[in-house]
Image (tube, helix red, strand yellow):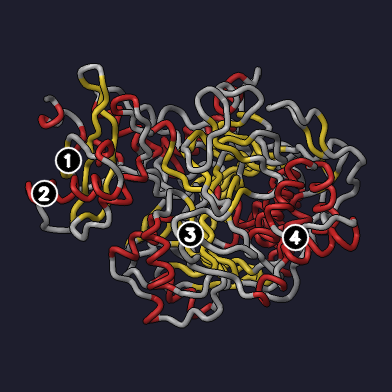
Amino acid sequence: MLEPMWQPSAERASASNLAAFIDWQQTERRRIFSNYAELHSWSVSNQPAFWSDFWDWAGIISEKKGERILIDAEKMPGASYFPDARLNFAENLLRHCNEQPALIFRREDGLEKTMSGNELVSMAGQVSRALVAMGIQPGDRIAGFLPNIPEAIAIMAGAAAIGATWTSCSPDFGAQGVLDRFGQVQPKVMVTVDGYVYADKRIDLRSKIKAVAEELEGLEKIVVIPFLEDKTDITDIPYSLMLEDWLKGHSDAPPDYIHLPFDHPLYILYSSGTTGAPKCIVHKAGGVLLQHLKEYILHTDMKPGMRHFYFTTLGWMMWNWQASGLAAGATLMLYDGSPFHPDGNVLWNYAEEQKFDVFGTSAKYLEGCHKGGINPAKTHDLKNLKTILSTGSVLVPEGFDYVYESVKADVCLASISGGTDLCGCFVGGVPTQPVWRGEIQAPALAMDVATLREDGSRTSLGEKGELCCMGPFPSMPIGFWNDTDGSRYFDAYYSTYKNVWRHGDFAAFTKSGGLVIYGRSDATLNPGGVRIGTAEIYRQVEQLPEVLESIVIGQDIDGDVRVVLFVRLREQQELSDDLVQRIKKRIREGASPRHVPAKVLQVTDIPRTRSGKIVELAVRDVVHNRPIKNKEALDNPEALEQFRDREELQY
């Protein structure tokens, strides 16, 4: 086996939260674990003990924990955690807040704002009382149509303090995209801004807000935060008022936290919606709290006072995940705007100036920095940076090379994977273990992750299969909104294998105990009956300097499937016969002859969701002349037209 790309020093490993938890297990529970693998095995086999211990060790604030930890563990869905507990998510979220900064915000154009922990708690208290004054009850929906600003977290916390259910999307969504989401859950209050800044453009939102307000049933109040202008005219927007006026007269004392059941609905998140109306996934307060604290404290090694950044919008579950960093004592570093304006150094500048400890982003962002020649290792002082987190799509081995060669050699690169469906991670970082090139480090604690064959048997080491979770976990959704009999929820995750969560990724375990994901299993190619992960093709073709990015699909033809690759090239590059042959040669030698596309075609843009994921299924539907059910889920739906009725695909 080759050498790892990163190995934690003995000092760093022994000082980690994970090591402290293992020591606590030995001293307080008389359980001895010599390594992570042993702890993981025990946590999977002894879930009630693990989660009860973690609750105590992490210091969860609750009115009541209860004696019952996990009931109906054999049911997927149906298992229930801490059925007798009473707690409040916001109380735990804000527990570390003090006079020190809790939220540090920067906008693309240089606007900055810092909110201390005490100021955050005060604003959450005002929000909670403003909502109560309106008659908002536990379970009522509060919607955020917002950029990634401090007020968004404060308002979410204020809503959670009284048991209201938070849901959000980012302001780049079109009016129909907002209605496709909020229209299903009918919020009583929507909080928004007058506009936002992106790629050096100032974008006024007021006409879009008005269009949403006129169609959104059940909406009683629109609260507008001035973000473009100090004074904004909102007279044309129905039942609207400014944030300052809404909060006026309400005490800024800490919220009066309402203690609620573990399964009380905290968040409604949305699937990407590219194959139909977005699924409204309802997440429970206790499950999100426990799962996120485990991921932050044990897997990310977050400690009070550390500065944590994740590049995200309110339309991606990573915003909800980042917010939970407050519960681990982190200072959250927020950014709103383009990550490549005025150039690709803007986020690395932020990291250097604000001394980030943790830098979270997408694999596509790291690939974009690589293609753009961004080299922070030479241009920036990142001595405080301890961990880089990557998710959203597969981080290929060359992405690992880029981080360790061009960003920082001494950093834990934690490729993590899970998603909106569980509002957390199945697999991720382990701060006491080495990082191996191209691999996610390990399954997360208390997550019985496996890869399965079509017949439900476990694959062998290195054999690709469906990524599944064989047992329950606390952040399993309550269900889907308006799915009264639970059939849509069951069909989404549990219908393929009995009592098993099938996540929809194509993956394999490695000799080191880690995992490699090869792409979404519903986008897996199947030429000649052999399953091929799309990430294996992307890894090869995008190493060619002429290729900026690509998308690959399987086209049904003559009773079989042929592989079709579309490439976006650098400006003024043309797809010559020579380049096509070099692409095919690279794929043949780097992957296998089965991976070689039958067709290689040029496009000027690749369609993607608003969180940056390329949409292979939508492209496949266009090529096969099938309707696209929800273009509003896409950031650039116009790009799909390049794939329609291509003459080259007719033969």
For marks 3 and 2 on the same chain, the one whose residue lies earlier in the sequence: 3
Q: Please, what is the three-letter code of the amino acid marked with disc 2?
A: Leu
Element type at mark 1: strand
Residue at (44%, 56%) from the top-left corner? 438
- Local crowd size for mark 1, using a 10 Å CA cut-off: few (<14), some (14–19), many (≥20): many
Label 1–label 2 contact, CB within 8 A: yes
- Residue matched to label 3: 1
Residue most toward the left? 577
Amino acid of disc 1:
Val
Label 3–label 1 contact, CB within 8 A: no
Q: Secondary structure at mark 4?
A: loop
Q: Is any atom of residue 100 visible in this view?
A: yes
Spatial CA distance of label 1 from label 2 is 9 Å
**512 in relation to 369, above or below:** above
Which is in the foreground here, disc 4 or disc 3? Answer: 3
Residue 34 numbered mark, or none:
4
Q: Kindly indicate the quadrant of the structure image that contains residue 140.
A: top right
Q: Can residue 154 be seen by looking at this rendering?
A: no
Q: Amino acid at mark 4?
A: Ser
- For marks 3 and 2, give the CA distance: 38 Å
Kindly identify which residue carries mark 2. Answer: 575
Give how far apart the Cα atoms at labels 3 and 1 are.
35 Å
Which tag, 2 or 4, sits closer to the chain's start?
A: 4
Say which of marks 1 and 4 sits in front: 4
Q: Who comes first in sequence, dot 1 or dot 4?
A: 4
**Observer-nearest residue: 202 or 30?**
30
634, 185: nearer the viewer:
634
Mark 1 = which residue?
600
Q: Going by the image, does 504 lie left or right of 221?
A: left
